[in-house]
Amino acid sequence: MSTTSPSDLAVLFRSLTRRVQEAFGDAAPKGSELDAQLTKAAQLMHTTTDPTAIAVAIDRIAADDWDDATLDSMRAVALEIGHRIREISEIHHRDD
């Protein structure tokens, strides 16, 4: 898929709360596509949907211990999250 490393994924999830706040302001919707992607990531990492918990779970796996399917799935989730945040940010900034 891509060459995104597990540590890159952890950085994305650690910064996600801030990025969502910047994109949505105080009106981050529940039940959104972002929530669906966080649910996927949490299931893959066997943790809660809290972005920090996902990042911690990612960091607990040594780079050489990742299986390709899980890493590719996490990369796909990260790409979708990035896409959704950019999309919402563009809409929000046009409305300002």
Image (tube, helix red, strand yellow):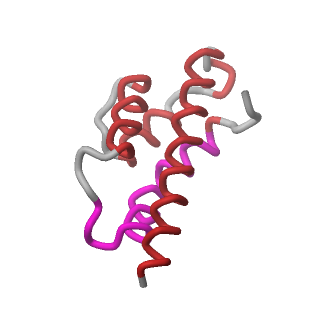
Highlighted range, magenta = 7-28
Q: Quadrant of the N terminus?
A: top right
Position of residue 44 in the picture relative to residue 7 (left or right): left
Q: Residue at x 38, y 39 (%)?
A: 38
Q: Residue at x 42, y 84 (%)?
A: 96
Count of numbered tags: 0
Residue toward you, 64 or 25: 25
Residue 48 vertical position relative to residue 51 in the rendered view, above or below: above
Residue toward you, 95 or 35: 95
x, y (%) of residue 10? 54, 44
x, y (%) of residue 5? 69, 37
x, y (%) of residue 61? 54, 27
Q: Is 24 a magenta residue? A: yes
Position of residue 8 in the picture relative to residue 33 (left or right): right
Magenta-drawn stretch, dominant element (helix, strand or loop): helix
Residue 57 vertical position relative to residue 52 in the rendered view, above or below: above
Q: Residue at x 39, y 59 (%)?
A: 17
Q: Residue at x 55, y 51 (%)?
A: 82
Position of residue 4 in the picture relative to residue 26 (left or right): right
Residue 19 vertical position relative to residue 68 in the rendered view, above or below: below
Q: Quick one: which residue is furthest to the bottom in this view?
A: 96
When asked about the image quadrant of residue 33, the answer is top left
Position of residue 63 in the picture relative to residue 56 (left or right): right
Q: Quick one: which residue is furthest to the right in this view?
A: 3
x, y (%) of residue 55? 46, 42
